[in-house]
Image (tube, helix red, strand yellow):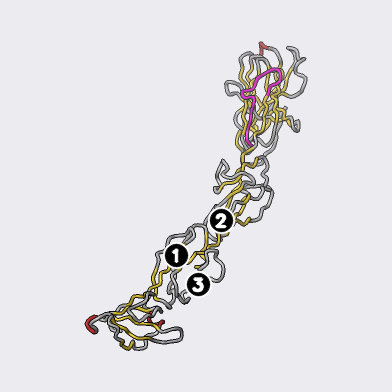
Amino acid sequence: LSSQSYVGFSTASFLNSGVTTPFCWLRSGSSYGSSYALRVGSSGESGGDLVNDTGGVRPAAHLSLSSIASLIPITITYNSNGGSSCASISVAYGSTYGTLPTPTKTGYTFDGWYKSSALTGSAVTSSTTVTTNHTLYAKWTANTYYIEYNGNNATSGNMSVSTHTYDIAKALTTNTYTRTGYSFLGWSTSSTATTATYTNGQNVTNLTSINGGLIVLYAVWQANPYTITIQASSGGSVSSTGGKYASGDTITSFAAPNVGKAFLYWVRASDNAQILENPLNQSVTKNETYTAIFGASVEGVNISSTKGGVVYLVGDDFDNLTDTDTITFATKQVLQGYTFSHWEDMNGNNLGTEMSIRLQKSLVMDNIIKAVYVQSTNNSVNDQVNN
């Protein structure tokens, strides 16, 4: 055929020859003065005759059916099955697909194009031969991702990584971590979170769309509240009576003696320990009760100490003292790097290292006596009691 030729198929009977086999019309511009029909021979024939509209016959140069069909465009339509759209293409009959498009779909990996909408059989390739108009269907495989469970300062427990599939709900692994003094609230993607994003054993989907991606969930902890009770025995009061505290908090309370009484020490209920510091300054680790103990003192005398230690009364039977009895004060170092030096009065006079006061008001009225502590070069902690 010349470069000016074109074809068009028909199955109608043409002219007056009675032929009903498929044929095509060819026009060759000025080469022929009229239209010609190519009558394609029956099965097995490689060519046919050209017949004009007056019935004349002209040789068809042995045109085969396959050579004519190769001129017909084939349309390929893509169904991405929820993925990104792909434009239809046209290829010649009997040619190959050529480069096939690669669509994308969040959370899925593309697994090829299939002629079957059921995605059965084998995927087509760029070299697959095309002979009819048809649609290709995209096949997808859901991505797999992993979740790691971080104890986030847990004191015990161990958990394995769990495997998850995109678009499929699955429960988080039940927590096995514990943390002393804390309650588990749930999980978060932040190690510093104070509230949980996911609860224990919650069903989750699509925590990441990346194939092989890893999500780290951190345990969220809340400090357990402990009840601290601070109270005073008869003879004084305390500045704080306690309350609810988190593990690691510090409690502080000052023991104030009534007139004629002196602070002796604190008693910690859990181990019956005597604590000489005042104010009380203790770290919270559990439920606890502290009681300030007071004893008889000398009315009109203010007994105190400088930084580094405390003073307390020696003895335990202070409620039955008389005005002629004598009470003795002792000192105790409570801060590292300090030692007891001496007693002194309100005028700064050194009263020595021992302090006993007779319970006669006329001798001690309105006096101020304090135990003096000084910093030492020896940083070891030693208790020093002077009677």
Q: Amino acid at mark 2?
A: Tyr
Dot 1 corresponds to which residue? 78
Q: Amino acid at mark 3?
A: Val
Residue 220 location, x and y as percent?
A: 60, 44
Badge 3 or badge 1: first in the primary sequence = 1
Q: Is residue 246 magenta?
A: yes
Q: What is the spatial separation of the Cα atoms under label 3 and label 1, in whole angstroms?
A: 12 Å
Query: Dot 1: what SS?
Result: strand
Number of residues whose C-alpha sits closer than 10 Å to that of mark 1, classed few (under 14), some (14–19) or many (20 or more): many
* In this picture, residue 177 sits left or right of residue 190: right
Q: What is the spatial separation of the Cα atoms under label 3 and label 2, in whole angstroms?
A: 26 Å
Dot 3 corresponds to which residue? 124
In which quadrant of the rendered image does the N terminus lie? bottom left
Badge 3 or badge 2: first in the primary sequence = 3
* In this picture, residue 229 sits left or right of residue 197: right
Q: Is residue 97 above or below residue 371?
A: below
Whether residue 121 is visible: yes
Dot 2 corresponds to which residue? 166
Q: Nearer the viewer, mark 3 or mark 2?
A: 3
Q: Is residue 176 above or below residue 344?
A: below
Q: Nearer the viewer, residue 101 or 15?
A: 15
Residue 324 location, x and y as percent?
A: 74, 13
Q: Is residue 162 above or below residue 126?
A: above
In which quadrant of the rendered image does the C terminus lie? top right
Looking at the image, do the residues carrying marks 3 and 2 touch, with CB atoms under 8 Å apart? no
Q: Amino acid at mark 1?
A: Tyr
Q: Which residues are magenta?
A: 231-247
Residue 221 location, x and y as percent?
A: 61, 42
